Amino acid sequence: MIKDREKHTVGLVAIGRIPEMVLKVISGHILGYLNLPTCCLPAQGLPQACLDEKRLQYDAGKIIQHLESCAFADCTKILGLVEADLFVPIFTHVLGEAQQGGDHAVISLSRLQYRNNGTRSSEAEFYERSAKVALHELGHLFNLFHCRDSHCLMHFSGTIETLDAIELNYCPACRNFLDGPRRPALASIGPDG
C-alpha cells in the first residue's frame, strides 16, 4: 500500500542513452496511475562491472546494487532505465527487476523496441510497453506481488507477447492494495520481475 503518498517521489535515472520522451511517458504514467510525483535524476553511464561477458547481457541485480550505492536526495523510490538487455541468473532475460518492498528497480528498454517477428515496434507500442514495465516494477517496490489476473499490470510477463496482452491497468485487487489497507489475499505466484 502506498502510505503517505505526499512523502513519496519516484526518481527516474537514465543509465546510458535513454530518449527523453521515454522518461516523460513513464513520468506521466506514474503520476496518472499511482498519483506520485517523479523527478529525472542526473543520467549515468552503464556500469561495465555489471556486464556478464559470457552472456553479453547486464546483470539486473548488480545494476540495482549500483543504484543502491548512489546518493539520490529527495527520492523515496528509484527506477533505473537501461537500453541494454538484462538478465537474472535463473532467466535468459528480464524486462525489469525490483527489490520486493524496497526502494530500487531497473527496467530494460532493449526488447520493448521490437515485435516478436523481429520488426521494429511502433513508437506507441514502445511507449506503452515501457510504461507497463515501469508500473509493474514500481508495484513491487510498493510490495505488490505477481497477480494471477492475466490482464493486470502485476501479472508476470517474461515475453513481449505476454506483456502486450496485459492491460495498462492494475486489477481491482491490486488497485485496492495500492489505494487502501493491505489485503491478505494477494500472493506471489512466480519470480520477481
Image: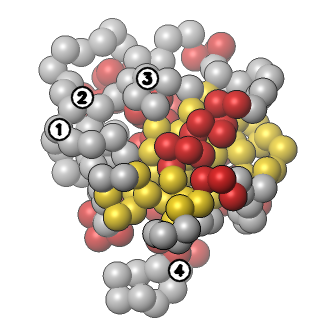
Residue pictured at 19% horizontal, 14% vertical: 184
Disc on res. 173: 2
Label located before the other in sequence (3 or 1): 3
Residue pictured at 65% horizontal, 22% vertical: 76
Q: Are marks 2 and 4 in contact (CB under 8 Å)?
A: no
Report, in whole angstroms, how far the alpha carbon at label 1 lies from the one at label 4: 32 Å
* Residue type at numbered disc 1: Ile
Q: Are marks 1 and 2 in contact (CB under 8 Å)?
A: no
Disc on res. 101: 3
* Residue type at numbered disc 2: Ala
Say above or below: 111 vs 91.
below
Tell me the SS state at disc 4.
Answer: loop
Residue 183 placement, left or right of 122: left
Report, in whole angstroms, how far the alpha carbon at label 1 lies from the one at label 2: 15 Å
- Within 10 Å of the Cα at label 2, are there few (<14), some (14-19), or many (20+) other Cα atoms? some
Single out the residue that lies furthest toward the front: 54
* Residue type at numbered disc 3: Gly
Q: Nearer the viewer, mark 1 or mark 4?
A: 1
